[in-house]
Image: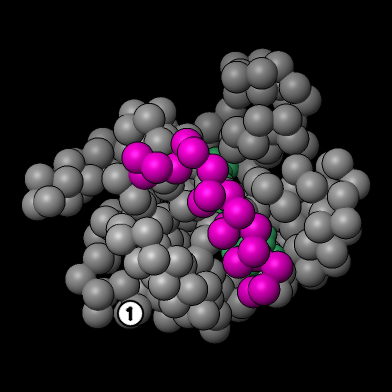
Amino acid sequence: MRIILLGPPGAGKGTQAQSISNKYNIPQISTGDIFRKNIAGGTELGILAKSYMDKGLLVPDNVTIDLVKNRLKEDDTHNGFLLDGFPRTIHQAEVLEALLKEQSVAIDVALQIEVPREFIIQRMTGRRVCPNCGASYHLEFNPPMLRGICDDCGSHLIQREDDKRETVVERLEIYDFQTAPLIAYYTEKGKLKTVDGTKAINEVFEDIIRILGEANDHH
Ligand code: ADP
Ligand code: AMP
């Protein structure tokens, strides 16, 4: 299956993406994670991406699109993939569609995780992430077994630079202007499915599995 995850920052895309990727055995492609890996590695791409990310802005389309184009050329994507955090603009969505068309394939589902604004700030300010494997935790809603330590790989958890309150507000504005129009875009294409993201993490996952199962049956 070829799946896109949509939703505002803090909706739970990364959290669900890991479980979906394991269940369907498809790679999770998170542009945010790729940028953060590059920042940690001090690459040229990382330095460029950081200058936008720290301000809560989107990394320019040409840079992001090149990155995804290259990632989708890798063999592990042939049986499907899960895009988490891409596309984030209409232009990115259009390029992705054209790219897949060249390979005679298409997105199966654009899955929107719907979470009202009042939940989001609390989710993002309480988020702690693993700089090594990208796993996402929450101080209150999804704490690791050992305080400050990743359950999966044992690394020390950190707070993301862009999860500070001021940056969160900026990111939500950018989402409304640049990314939210994708909901109408995928609705028109008949690809949009929506899940209620306010439930507990495992309940959201169960709902997602049901929705993806139904979408798969129709093919
Ligand atoms: P995104 O990738 O969409 O930005 P994350 O998956 O990192 O969002 O989730 C944001 C924060 O909210 C994390 O701290 C995560 O642990 C927490 N979270 C995710 N899903 C839920 C949920 N259903 N209920 C409560 N907290 C959640
Ligand atoms: P995320 O981890 O998905 O919350 O992304 C963190 C940051 O990385 C975003 O705020 C953007 O600055 C940048 N980013 C991630 N994905 C994209 C994208 N598809 N287009 C532009 N910028 C992106």
Q: Residue at x 52, y 61 (%)?
A: 86
Asked if residue 110 is among those painted magenta in the image, a careful observer would answer no
- Residue bounds of the magenta highlight: 61-80
Tell me, yes or no, if residue 112 can be seen here: no
Side (left or right) of 72 relative to 151: left
Is 122 placed left or right of 38 in the picture? left
Q: Position of residue 54 (x, y in %)?
A: 81, 63
According to the picture, the residue beneath numbered tag 1 turns out to be 184
The relative height of residue 151 versus residue 212 in the rendered view (above or below) is above
Q: Camera-side residue: 29 or 119?
A: 29
Is 71 included in the stretch rendered in magenta? yes
Query: Which SS class for mark 1?
Result: helix
- At horizontal 87% and vertical 50% (from top left) the residue drawn is 43
Residue drawn at x 36%, y 74% is 183
Residue in the picture at 74% in, 35% down: 131
Badge 1 crowding class, 10 Å Cα cut-off, few under 14, some 14 to 19, many 20 or more, is few
Q: What amino acid type is highlighted by mark number 1?
A: Ala
Answer whether residue 98 is visible to the viewer in this image.
yes
In the rendered image of this protein, does residue 31 appear above or below residue 132? below
Considering depth in this image, is 166 or 17 the residue closer to the camera? Answer: 17
Count numbered badges in the picture: 1
The color scheme shown is one colour
